[in-house]
Amino acid sequence: MCGIVGYVGRRPGKPIILDGLRRLEYRGYDSAGLTLLEAGGLETVRAVGNLDALFAAVGDGASPATVGLGHTRWATHGSVRVENAHPHADCTGRISVVLNGIIENYKELRAALTARGHRLTSETDAEVVVHLVEEHAGEGLAAAVRAAIPRLEGHFAFCAVSADEPDLVVGTRREAPLVVGVGEDEMFFASAIPAFLSHTREVIVLEDGDVVTLRASGAECTDVAGVSVERAVSVVPWDQDAAEKAGYDTFMLKEINEQPAALRDTLAGRLSEAGDVDLAETGMGDEMLRRLRRIFIVACGTSYHAGLIVSYAIEQLARVPVQIDVASEFRYREPVFDPDTLVIGITQSGETADTLAAMRLARAAGSPVLALCNIMGSQATREADHVLFTRAGLEIGVAATKTHTAQVAALLLLALRLAWARGVQPEAELRRLGHELRAVPEKLEELLARPSAVEEIAARYRDERFFLYLGRGMGFAVCLEGALKLKEISYIPTEAYAAGEMKHGPIALLDKESPVVVVADDSPVFPKLVSNVEEVRARGADVIAVATDGNETIRELSRDVLWVPRTDHHLAPILTVVPLQLLAYHIATLKGYNVDQPRNLAKTVTVE
Ligand code: M6R
């Protein structure tokens, strides 16, 4: 959940590491720190708060150090205070470590280290690592790291530097991300590629258990036993623009506007002009799809909402029963697996601990697992039997937007292919839907370009204390996502309800003060939704509807309508969620909040 940067090269490392941390700040931003290998030994600076605090603490002064580590933290073990910020030092002050992940047995290790005379100064799990490394420091830093690893339980990536070997950085990973950037006479470690994308696009993706020594001249990789291993260098297709705001005020707004491109890329090569779907790349042939008797979908947050949206389409189109659960519940509820149940783990980052755990559980019990993921080489893609990538590009805003709509599009492809393989829908109907899906990116482009009332609505309701979201079917799932967006970036309490359920409780919340957002797509249950909207109006609440162009019934019932282009109702969630993203965005910015880094959140949640 934290961000790690390591640098060794010929250039001064301080600005390179600080810039790398800026690009990883989305991973955590409650404290940060930096260690540089100066002539006199290690110099470490740590600060509480986001990176501005660290920048202020380190000052503008130049440093000649060409080796160093940086860290931006999202607190798990230990409160947010400077002693708990990374890097952590050993007792001698000659070794420094930054860690991302969790050391599960840190309490036992801490007790044992203390009994052996180590003096630990933080409440973190991470600090035990530097002291374990210290115990073998005489063998050299890489050997000391290798000696520490078997004593650690949990999932982690860490990097270490030593004043006694001032020309290198050592890093390792186990079920947490760490990549190497290969530059010209310089090398980088980072939790994610954007940290060094302005310096190099050449990347080495590490495997679990790799211990890598970086010098300016290159990388040496071994396994935990010290046996040399070869890792290939690949070139990432992103350029620096992907990690910049490109003229937008925020990453979130940029990413909302990148949705048409993300959708086009996700559909490319998988959906023909005639509307036929080809997902052969996943290795799930029609034979396997025909055999399936059930699908489990597991995911968290926005990815869960994408799964919920498309669970309706899978059941309606492919006639396969779908059960969907948030991964943190699923993993502990003892689900019943079998080889004819496909488990789909949806995770844009491929790092979410609960989703990974649920996927592992399913695999161990003999169910095939498909990962729907946005990040190549991520843990989810390594642990699944089958992988389907969204191609949304890098998403930096903590609130997921373009990865969500890309997930819905990719899952709709799967629904269409399943239906085709199982022969449960007329082929012409599936082609019609495929054809419609191809047109959605253009419709979304048009939606984003048209004048909209969303900013005016945001200004009117920015100080409301509560928003209720109502919808039915897929529209209900869209409401859950819209309500999550608003609460996570504007901190306004929201509730999303299946509209038909409102009269069983939440209607008590309504009065003239409560805006009600209604997602009114053109599904067969639209007439039922209309009755629910009437119930809302009867309580004096303002209705803000998201509806298809030309829907006169909704126009008459609502104070405001956010219009979206017409499409098939199975595909509508890709369009109807966008005004809700924008509503949340504008309310939060009017309130003066940092939408890219909402409080208490992190982009990837690698802890349970
Ligand atoms: O990387 P993942 O898709 O597994 O992440 C899942 C959730 O943590 C994520 O969607 C979260 O809910 C976002 N903050 C939503 O905006």
Image (cartoon, rainbow, N blue to C red):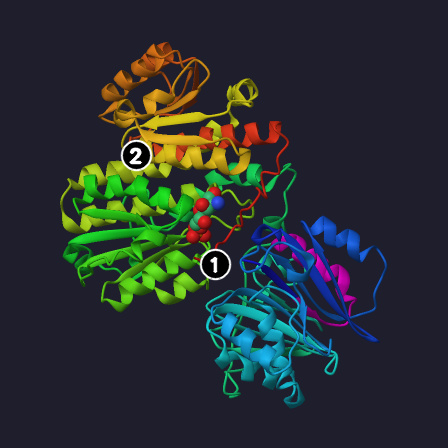
What residue is rendered at 58% in x and 74% in y?
A: 129
Could you say where residue 391 lies in the image, as x and y percent from the top left?
45, 51
Q: Is residue 482 above or below residue 518?
A: below
Drawn side of residue 389 relative to residue 49, left or right: left
SS at circle 2:
helix
Q: Is residue 180 magenta?
A: no
Q: Is residue 187 above or below residue 285?
A: below
SS at circle 1:
loop
Along the line of sight, the residue nearer the viewer: 57 or 69: 57
Please state the extent of the stretch shown in magenta in the rendering.
6-24
Q: Amino acid at mark 2?
A: Met
Q: Please state, as top left, top right, bottom left or bottom right, where the C terminus lies in the image.
A: bottom left
Q: Is residue 22 magenta?
A: yes
Q: Residue furthest right?
A: 61
Q: Is residue 339 above or below residue 48?
A: below
Front of the two marks 2 and 1: 1
Q: Residues within 10 Å of mark 2 (few under 14, many from 20)?
A: many
Q: Is residue 178 above or below residue 139?
A: above
What residue is rendered at 39% in x and 49% in y?
A: 300
Q: Could you say which quadrant of the image residue 66 lies in?
A: bottom right
Along the line of sight, the residue nearer the viewer: 185 or 341: 341
Which residue is identified by label 2? 474
Which residue is identified by label 1? 606
What's the CA distance linking mark 2 and mark 1? 29 Å
